[in-house]
Every structure is written in C-alpha cells, then in structure tokens.
Image (cartoon, rainbow, N blue to C red):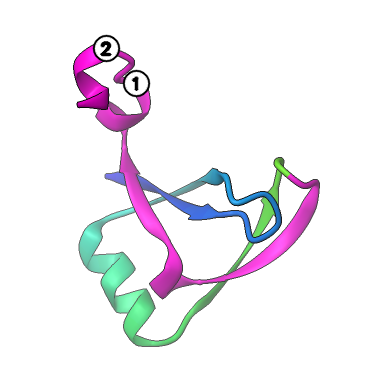
Amino acid sequence: MAVVRYRCPTSGEYVTTSIETSDETLARMSATGLIIWAWCPQCMSGHQIKAADATLQTEIEANDTSPMAEI
C-alpha cells in the first residue's frame, strides 16, 4: 500500500494525503475521471485533484532521509 499525494496548485509543494491505495486502484480511479477533494496544509485550502494528477508515495520513500535517497 501507498498513500496518495498531489502537488498543491498554489504553492507547488507536494502534499501527502491520508488516502491509502494501490497502483492498480489509482489507475482505475484515473480511468474513471475521479476527482479527489483534499485539504491542503500548504495553503490552508481545499483542492479538487484529478486522480490522474495524483501520485503514490510508499512508506519507504516517506521515511528515507539517507543521503543516497537524493542521488
């Protein structure tokens, strides 16, 4: 499992949601044109994000702060 993240259209920063899903489910959501409404802590506003514009962040990516992660 991974969590859905998107880029805030106001700040341009990535926002990680609490929505957990798989690659397959995100692909199905994208194919149906699903819109996700998410609160943004970057700009303190809500955004409507197309599932097709979202990405997945695994727990390993979120916790990897080693210097090798930047290479």
The residue singled out by tag 1 in the image is: 63
Residue 66 bears which disc, if any? 2
Residue 40 versus residue 68: which sits nearer the camera? 68
- Identified at 43% across, 62% down, the residue is 54
Residue 42 bears which disc, if any? none
Residue 51 versus residue 43: which sits nearer the camera? 43
Q: Amino acid at mark 2?
A: Ser
Q: Is residue 43 left or right of residue 34?
A: right
Q: Amino acid at mark 1?
A: Asn
Q: Residue furthest bottom?
A: 32
**Residue 7, image x and y in percent?**
53, 54
In which quadrant is the N terminus drawn? top left
Q: Is residue 30 left or right of residue 12?
A: left
- Identified at 26% across, 56% down, the residue is 22
Quarter-of-image position of residue 57: top left
**Residue 47, image x and y in percent?**
69, 64
Instruction: Name above or below for residue 4 compared with residue 66.
Output: below
Instruction: Name above or below for residue 33 compared with residue 58.
Output: below
Graded by Cα atoms within 10 Å as few (under 14), some (14 to 19) or many (20 or more), the crowding at tag 1 reads few
- Spatial CA distance of label 2 from label 1 is 9 Å
Quarter-of-image position of residue 9: bottom right
- Identified at 29% across, 67% down, the residue is 25
Q: Is residue 61 left or right of residue 36?
A: left
In which quadrant is the C terminus drawn? top left
Graded by Cα atoms within 10 Å as few (under 14), some (14 to 19) or many (20 or more), the crowding at tag 2 reads few
**Residue 34, image x and y in percent?**
48, 80
